[in-house]
Amino acid sequence: MWVAEARITPNRIAMQFGVDDLSFSTTYWYDDVDFDALEAAQGADAVRSIVFHVVAFEAAKLTALQPAVVDFGVYRDLVTPAFWELWSTVWRSVWGQWRFEKGLSDYPGPRLAHDLAAPSEIAVESPALCARPLLFVGGGKDSLVAMSVLDAAGYEYDTYSYSHSAYGTAAFQHELIERLASHGVRANVHRKQWVFDDFLDSPVTRVRPDLGSNGLLAAETPSSLFGVLPVVLQHGHDTVVFAHERSADAGNLTWDLTGEEINHQWGKSIEAERLLQAYVETELIRGLTYTSVLKPVYDPVIFSALRRRGNAVRDTHSCSARKPWCEACAKCAYVWINYRGFLSEAALEGMFRTNPADTPANQLWFRQMLGLEDHIPFDCVGQVAETLLAFELASRRGLAGEAVTTYRERCAPLSDATLVELFAVASGHHTMRQDMAARVLPVLESWASDGLALARRALAGR
């Protein structure tokens, strides 16, 4: 596996990498980044280091072809012990599901084709020119609630989104996201990025089966963090905010062959957040905070908070297969059952064309989410207790369907102690700066208290 030097123009990073004689490309376009200006302000070495991290984490997806070694080429001088430890940890954790599904317990990932470089002193100080946090808006319910949290906490903020060619046309993706971002009461500038990738949708594993097993995968969350760093430096943001919830911290299963936890959402976990925050602040941009304002809470707090947003919920989308909703994947099924449990039918009018509880393709997903199979689905869904609560609330509101029947016949209701835990706010479970936590946590605690009271009334039949 090899990495070529990226080609940089004022608003674009063009990457090329490959395995043996095959080459692939990924291009990042930015609407408001000028790399010439960045080099003049921060120095060529600092910009080159950030570009290298963008390239290195995008190139990681080529490990699906099971290369024995990786050569970072002209960037060898930046492959420090700290970088290699981070890259290797992200690889082991994000590609854990891929290795499990492909039965590759003995594949350790590629080894370095060259020696490690000496630790570098390239990190720059955050310009801190803009007091507004930069909030990632992906278009889903978490994004809407994260905007609501910042609004309620009194923050002015900018929003940021990216499209990816693996998800369809860029214009349609940005149209969906901008529609949701427009609901941010205190939102100011909406910044955009476009990602064009010719690997994830390629037939490489079909036409070259000798290169490895099927199943292409990218480290989307770490890649998106490194991808936003040019925007951060250009505009002087000192805080990058994601909308990752506590539900993502627990894994799908423990792999009996290796003893490791397999977590589809590891890139969104508190472990990943702390690891990436510490690395970026130490090695790349000192004074920059990477955090999530939703990390202290589970999904029931988030879904119940959506009741405050009325019709804005109709502008959310959470499907990675066919946006806005395919209605036949685990993610659609999970969000839908929670919407039906926590929100009124009027708030959801026109969003879904079918009853996913009766869709044959969804029955496995629902059984997995209810804890009736070996593990929960490999998708961005909550834990079993969260799904059980959603089904109980939805069934009490009259929802019918095959999946609801399965729930009623095979699942026990939650205890009040479990309900309390689902609406608890973990005040120390985050990477927010103290000043931000002091403003955000009271908002979450108020909403969690309201959500618990709402759930208890519903479960009591009132």
Image: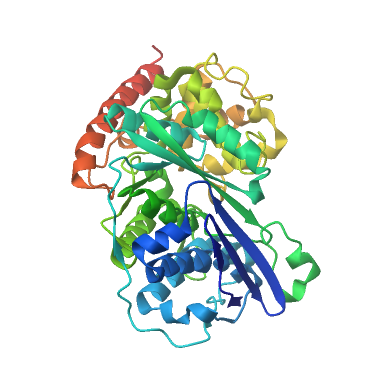
- Residue 108 appears left or right of 124: right
User: Which of these two is toward me, 290 or 237?
Assistant: 237
Where is residue 400 drawn, in percent x and y?
61, 21
Q: Work out which residue is located at the far right of the displayed protein and give it.
A: 207
Where is residue 213 drawn, in percent x and y?
69, 69
Q: Is residue 212 above or below residue 422?
A: below
Q: Which image quadrant is residue 358 in?
A: top right
| Residue at (60% x, 27% y) in the render | 405
Image quarter hosting the C terminus: top left
Tag count: 0
| Residue at (41% x, 63% y) in the render | 39
Image quarter hosting the N terminus: bottom right
Where is residue 179 drawn, in percent x and y?
54, 29
User: Which of these two is toward me, 376 or 248?
Assistant: 248
User: Which of these two is toward me, 332 or 239?
Assistant: 239
User: Which of these two is toward me, 427 or 285?
Assistant: 285
